[in-house]
Amino acid sequence: MESNESKELKLEEAFEKLEETVQALEQEDISLEESFQLYKSGMELLKQCNQSIDMVEKKVLVLNENGETDEF
């Protein structure tokens, strides 16, 4: 049984898959059905990327003027 972490793509992997999706969508001989499926999977990847970025932003610590760290 796989853990959730192994099922989720790393951010870099998701960006690579998004790039592949964009390249596939740019092909002239793609059917309407194929393009819709690619668009749909691309939007899911984009959603996953946004969630990953949001989680990272919440974990980032900012150094304040007193030299103490505050959560971002």
Image (cartoon, rainbow, N blue to C red):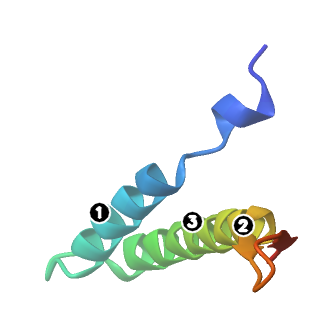
Q: Between 8 and 34, which is closer to the camera in this rendering? A: 8
Q: Disc 2 or 3, which lies upstream in sequence?
A: 3
Residue highlighted by disc 2: 60
Disc 2 to disc 1, C-alpha distance: 30 Å
How dense is the environment of label 1, judged by Cα within 10 Å: few (below 14), some, or many (20 and up)?
Answer: some
Q: Residue furthest front?
A: 66
Q: Residue at x 74, y 20 (%)?
A: 2
Q: Disc 2 or 1, which lies upstream in sequence?
A: 1
Disc 1 to disc 3, C-alpha distance: 11 Å
Residue highlighted by disc 3: 45
How dense is the environment of label 2, judged by Cα within 10 Å: few (below 14), some, or many (20 and up)?
Answer: few
**Which amino acid lies under the numbered mark 2 shown in the image of this protein?**
Val
Q: Between 66 and 62, which is closer to the camera in this rendering? A: 66
Q: Secondary structure at mark 2?
A: loop
Q: Quick check: 34 left or right of 63?
A: left
Q: Secondary structure at mark 3?
A: helix
In the rendered image, the vertical position of residue 17 relative to residue 7, given as above or below: below
Q: Residue furthest left?
A: 28
Residue 20's disc number = 1
Give the quadrant of the N terminus.
Answer: top right
Q: Disc 1 or 3, which lies upstream in sequence?
A: 1
In the rendered image, the vertical position of residue 57 relative to residue 14, given as above or below: below
**Which amino acid lies under the numbered mark 1 shown in the image of this protein?**
Glu
Q: Secondary structure at mark 1?
A: helix
2 and 3 marks in contact (CB < 8 Å)? no
In the rendered image, the vertical position of residue 21 relative to residue 13, given as above or below: below
Q: Quick check: 55 left or right of 22?
A: right
In percent of width and height, residue 44 lies at: 63, 68
**Which amino acid lies under the numbered mark 3 shown in the image of this protein?**
Leu
